[in-house]
Structure formats: C-alpha cells, structure tokens
Amino acid sequence: MSQVTELSLAFHLAADRIGYTFYCTEPELERLQRQIVAARRALVDIDHAAARLLMGRFGYCEQCRADIPVARLATIPEARYCAGCTAGTP
C-alpha cells in the first residue's frame, strides 16, 4: 500500500511539474502509471490470497486443485496455480 501511495504522489508531483493534461504522453508519467498499475495488481493478488486462506483454499491450484508446493508458495505466496498449470496458461 505504501508503494502505491508513493508512486501516486510521484505521479502527481511529476504531472504538476510537466503541466499534465489528459492526453499527455510524457514518458515519465507513463512509466509511473505502469508502476502504479503493477503495484495495485499486486495488492489485489495479496487480497485474493488472504481470501483463499480464510476459505481454506490457500495452497491449492485454482485450475487442477493440486497442492501448490511449499517452495513455490515461499517464493510466490500469492500463487494461484501450480507450476504445471502456470506453464499452460497464455
């Protein structure tokens, strides 16, 4: 959450400095927007993982229902799919 806040503040400061308009294509602003979107997606992934934990479905693949290995969860705690199903998704 702090990352989203910091990026949002950086975006607004840069926008004020540049004179941002809705159709502005300033590279710095576009980069900040991409980072904000990525950080917000990460928050959503974490929220979904917490919901799976509360429902007793954390650690199980959402596609094939197999156990997700502990090593994978240690690396990617918000993982929704096992490695096999992740490899098969576009």
Image (spheres, helix red, strand yellow):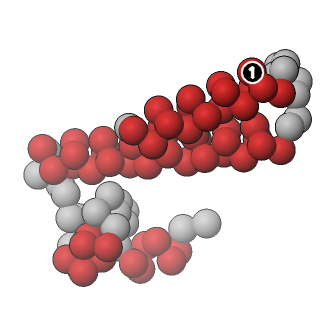
User: Image height check: is 90 above or below 41?
Assistant: below
| Residue sitting nearer the eye, 78 or 60 | 78
| Residue sitting nearer the eye, 14 or 41 | 14
Task: Find residue 51 and report its horizontal and vertical position in percent.
Answer: 22, 42
Locate the C terminus by quadrant: bottom right
Query: Could you classify mark 1 by the number of other residues whose Cα lies within 10 Å: few (under 14), some (14-19), or many (20 or more)?
Result: few
Task: Find residue 12 and report its horizontal and vertical position in percent.
Answer: 65, 25
Locate the N terminus by quadrant: top left
The answer to whether residue 22 is visible is yes
Please name the residue shown 32% across and 48% down the image.
46
Task: Find residue 16 and report its horizontal and vertical position in percent.
Answer: 74, 21
Amino acid type, mark 1: Asp
- Going by the image, does 90 lie left or right of 28? left
**The quarter of the displayed image where residue 48 is located:** top left
The answer to whether residue 41 is visible is no
Please name the residue shown 23% across and 64% down the image.
60
**The quarter of the displayed image where residue 14 is located:** top right
| Residue sitting nearer the eye, 17 or 66 | 17
Please name the residue shown 54% across and 68% down the image.
89
Task: Find residue 34 and report its horizontal and vertical position in percent.
Answer: 66, 45
- Going by the image, does 23 lie left or right of 65? right
Q: Which residue is mark 1?
A: 16
What is the total number of numbered labels drawn onto the structure image? 1
- Going by the image, does 74 lie left or right of 7? left
Please name the residue shown 50% across and 45% down the image.
39
| Residue sitting nearer the eye, 4 or 18 | 18
- Going by the image, does 63 lie left or right of 12? left
Q: Secondary structure at mark 1?
A: helix
